[in-house]
Image (tube, rainbow, N blue to C red):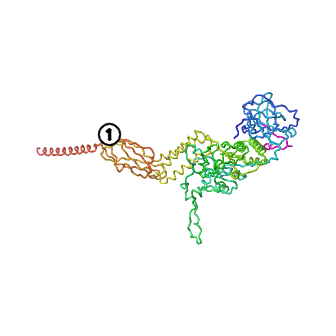
Amino acid sequence: MPAARSYLRRPGKKLVGLVAVTLGLAIMGFAAPVEAASPAATITVSATPADSGDLGSDTPLRLVVSLDNTGVTPTADATATVTVGTVPITVRATLAGWFTSTSGALASSPVGSSPFPSVAGGIDSGIEVTVPASALPWTLAGVYPVSVSIGSGTTVLGVAHTAVAWSVTASTPVPVAVAVPLTAPASGSEFLTATQLAQYTAPGGILTRELLDLQSTQVAVGIDPRIIASIRILGKTAPQTALDWLGQLEVLPNETFPLPWADADLTAPLHAGETSVLETKPLDYAIDPGLFPATQATPTPTPTPGVVTPVVPTSASLVQFNYTMPLLSWPAENSVIPSDLPKLAQAGISNVILSSANVKGAGGLGGASAKSGDTGIAISDDVLSGYLRSAIQSSTRANSTEALTELTTSLAVASIASGSTPHTILLTLGSNWATNESDFVRSLSQVYARPWTSTSTVASLFAGAPAAVTIAPERESAARLGLVESMLNAEAGVANFAPIAKTPDAITSSTRLRLLAALSNEWTTSTWPTAAEAFLSSASKITGSVQVAPSSEIVVIANQTALPVTISNNLDQEVTVVLSIRSRTALLSVDRNSRSQVITVDDSSQRRVQVPIEAVSNGNAEIVATLYSSTGVQVGQSVTIQVNVNAGWETTGTLIFAALVAALFAFGIVRTIRRRRRAVDE
């Protein structure tokens, strides 16, 4: 991406007060450029040439010059002065520096000026300036720098830099290929829901807009397989708009290649300690056969009436797509180190798209076709791609045209410099390129409308003779990798937990899909940490869903009794665990056959287990209950049960009770005898 500059990216306000001014005066009569202080912080100036800077030799130079006053104080009446370079720019880096005002002073000549009226605070106002062809000092075809300075007295309000490709018609066109991701907005779920798909594929929905734009071009399309699988897995409940959208995608004539599931970051897990590329696990757990219509079984010479079989997809068929470049993938920009390439190759990825900043030996006129070891590389020009992205995603037409001018004039320099053997240049769009209404089709048509460009394909980059390059190591931030490492550890915890479930794949596969979704490149810098924490929370919830329920203190008064232990299961499926019971003291003894027992607990329920224990002596004792999987991995936290042992109280109580009964019985006998004697005496 090009460096930000205040004079080229002004706020998207409505352009008001556009005034056309034709400058037909001789060069000698023009005012010289004003040289003074730097532009005020509240003032930005832009200049946009007509036709994205494509200027014929006999055509006047038309510029839309605007001033955006974000302050509260009106500007004074000023003068807009147009200055052009007298020598063409022949090096792309020099032109890029001109656009960012980092290039040194260039030979220049003033060619005209025009009054610029006062602009009130909070207003964006502009004029159109036309410089006659006869006033332009150029004789050699090429790309010339143009600047417009707006000044009042000795104060410079602002300066804008742009360029034009003058009389560039005889050069050999430079081939330009474009790659674009086809993705949905970031979501932490395994699949896109029917509601989301209905929204995204409705008229004006983001997937609808993306596909309509792509259908009008020859760009290569990287497709997120989660979108395809999300539509197919819904069966008869899939929205009709989504089915129609998928049908159009399947007949798209463009080059296509697969992105990772949910456009997940391929290399961050590798840099966080993973030894191989994260891939999806089987999707069969999520397939509901009831969502698919029944059809006649495989045709036979004499079909059996009434015999039908459901057309249920498989894990493979959910993501199956006829990609034209199935071995190509696209890691996150500037995220690859040399050791990543062999690991990508092990995952079946033999070709990748990398940014030019991530490659040593890229740039210049070598083109986009390269190779490092056994991996083919299509090098995306990061500077020119930045221009294209700005052109497509700018909020105003003026800003879009500014970026297009930067792009087309840079391509003109490349075309002229490459002579008769130009190499293909690859441009890419980033994630979320169609979040808002984009200027996609217009921008691409403007690029290919220039006489110095021609269309090319990504596949051609891997078919020719690639240049040998090395990887310029690029890692993501330590904070991001630290969080990714925590996510990988959390998934490993779920994988260790899963064997207790009746269908472990339903847990491990869904967790992997949610991990990939949380690693999606569609998340922004500000939203990704929240998505990562949400994944960590959901993984923790899974591993904590089966546990021994806490217990209050238990009083034991018998020598032998049963200790109640409750196991809770909050999963939506049955689990089988090994319950281990041990006493921490010699006051209590756990029955040998009950110290370890296999327990099955129904889904979303609890089960109470009676564990035989024997009191040995009086006092406070502790019993520790722990759950394990069949593989010996602990499940949940151990629970300590406090036991108050009063051994012998049961016998003593019985004796006391018997003595009381005997005393009462004796008392009754004595009383009866005494009554009878009293009666006899009377």
The image shows a total of numbered marks equal to 1
Magenta span covers which residues? 50-65
Residue nearest the observer in this picture, 667 or 78? 78
Q: Is residue 60 above or below residue 222?
A: above
Residue 574 percent across, percent down from the top left: 46, 53
The residue where tag 1 is placed is 619
Q: Nearer the viewer, residue 178 or 191?
A: 178
- Viewport quadrant of the N terminus: top right
The quadrant holding residue 337 is top right
- Whether residue 393 is visible here, answered yes or no, is no
Quadrant the C terminus occupies: top left
Residue 629: give x, y in percent of width and height.
Answer: 44, 50
- Percent coordinates x, y for residue 312 in the rendering: 57, 60
Horizontal placement of 595 versus 537: left or right?
left
Which amino acid type corresponds to the residue marked 1 in the rendered image?
Gly
- Secondary structure of the residue carrying tag 1 is strand
- The reply to whether residue 32 is in sight is yes
| Mark 1 neighbour density, 10 Å: few (under 14) some (14–19) many (20 or more) | some
Farthest residue in the bottom direction?
A: 302
Q: Residue furthest top?
A: 154
Location of residue 118 by image quarter = top right
Q: Is residue 40 magenta?
A: no
